Amino acid sequence: MLSRVQFVARSRSKGGAPSPTPRLRSMLLSVVLSLFWIGSAVAHAQLLTSTPAPNAVLVSAPQTVQLVFNESVIPLSVTLIATDGTRTDLTSVSTGGTTVAIRLPHGIDTGTHVLSWRAASTDGHPVAGSLIFSIGATTAVAQLASGDQLVLVALWSIKTLLYITLFLGTGGAMFGLVAPLPRAADAAARAAAVVGLILAPLSLGLHGVDALGLRLTDLLHGQPWAAGAATSYGVTVMALMAALALTLLALSVWSGIAYMACLVAAAALAASGHASTGEPQWLTRTAVFLHVGGALFWVGALVPLAIYLTSDSARTRKALNRFSRVVPFAVLPIVVSGATLAIIQLGPFDRRWFSTYGGILAAKLALVAGLLALAGWNRLWLTRPALTGDPARRLQLRLSVRAEIVLVLIILGLVSGWRFSPPPRSQPRAAEAVASGPIFVHMMAGSTIALVTITPGAAGPETIDVEIRDAQGTMVIPRDVTIALSAPTLSIERLRLPAKAIEGRWEVQGPLMPVAGTWHVEVILRIDTFALVQLSQDVAIP
């Protein structure tokens, strides 16, 4: 009687693949769905309000500080920096959720303090900020340390290499379901899977180092690894390692396991990241899943095809013919899902489209357009002559496939760069100017609301009117109001202008915004001797 291993080996050698059992299919479906639908909040958390408000001057130290976000977050690092630079770690006394409560130590000295925090949002990416408040009076603020740029370079490099190993390994195994892998391609896929199993956990540690704002040398400690595992990217890494392990089994035991490897890999990348956590998530996660699944097959086939095309044989013609018939079923989901994700990530057209994320997306779309043009040229004009034995066309086809490989490598590098730039949909939206009338801006900090009117709403002389109200809409009369204007992108530094009280509102007039562009408008209120509230928003001046 044949053993199970002998049966699988013989079935593989004959080109067949034993069908997975119902239990195996059920297990596969459960794993994929659990990865696919993990998380349910809007991506890239943003701080909405804080108590105390930014730059507030308090009579006495509060017992707790509250940070309110637009989605649930996990505190990774919370540090209180005193006036003299003394740092107190408050991470252990901080609670997570949409409202992060931080218990302050007793006996805080008079003066200005900085609460520096870092947290993980639902998409697995870190968000960070600082809250400045003063007890009794304002004093000099301690200098904050900057992050290690080497961490960003290392994280980008490792994630790019991880993507390459995933598409070469798992994608190569998927191509093996269409045609036998050439010996060199099989060896490359195995090596890629092994290297990927090393890079995946390393990327998790780097993710934690970046999330905590540590240095590259801190990778040797356990804290960043625990922080990385606490984010949704920890689920992605575990699933990617499972996909790569399944890839090795598909290449060694049974080629049918490649289906499972592909599904788990696609679900892994749908479990975290900007693209997956946009709303509606049923659509974005499905789009990412289809996008990655289609790309795995298409990209994974490029290296085996390039090797096949080095010779003219019956095996080459058979593999090329099979791939040519199947690849449209992979390209169509890539195009449709990619367009869907781009529309959701960009959001309504405004200046945010010209952010770093928008630039990376534009470059990727240009390269994908080139990739599709090459693929179309290959299929419509080169494949058929190559199948009939035309050596010139086969050479052109081989060079075209190599060009596709180069384009794919650049695209994967660009995709890794998205890790460091939030999509336009999650960036604060500047107030839109109305050409035919004033600009109205609604600012809010805690229970304080500032209703700002900028007239005429175009570059040149302006009048800025401000009304101050509380959360119930009741008018508030502060002791004084200061308007601060700056335009960092135009190299215009901060200008502070005292506002005049006029019948319950506050007004500033003059050549306030002489240049069109994005201006940062701040309203600084002194409620009483010890309370200072600051509200701000970006405004687009045409």
Image (cartoon, helix red, strand yellow):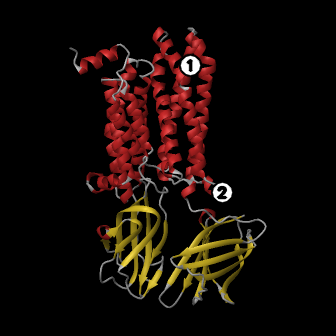
Q: Is residue 32 above or below residue 354?
A: above
Query: Which type of secondary structure does the marked residue at label 1 adopt?
Result: helix
In front: label 2 or label 1: 2
Q: Amino acid at mark 1?
A: Leu
Q: Is residue 432 above or below residue 472?
A: above
Q: Is residue 378 above or below residue 414?
A: above
Q: Amino acid at mark 2?
A: Asp
Other-residue count near label 1 (Cα within 10 Å), few / some / many at <14 / 14–19 / ≥20 = many
- The quadrant of the picture occupied by the N terminus is top left
Rendering coords of residue 413 (x, y %): 48, 41
Of 216 and 106, nearer the camera is 106
Q: Which residue is mark 2?
A: 350
Rendering coords of residue 456 (x, y %): 76, 72
Q: Which residue is mark 1?
A: 397
Which numbered disc, 2 or 1, marks the residue that appears first in the sequence? Answer: 2
Q: CB atoms at circles 2 and 1 under 8 Å apart?
A: no
Query: Which type of secondary structure does the marked residue at label 2 adopt?
Result: loop
Q: Quadrant of residue 333?
A: top right
- The quadrant of the picture occupied by the C terminus is bottom right
Of 475 and 443, nearer the camera is 475
The residue positioned 33% from the left and 69% from the top of the image is 94
Q: What label sits on residue 486 in the rendered view? A: none
The residue positioned 47% from the left and 44% from the top of the image is 416
The residue positioned 43% from the left and 71% from the top of the image is 67
Rendering coords of residue 311 (x, y %): 47, 12
Rendering coords of residue 128 (x, y %): 43, 63
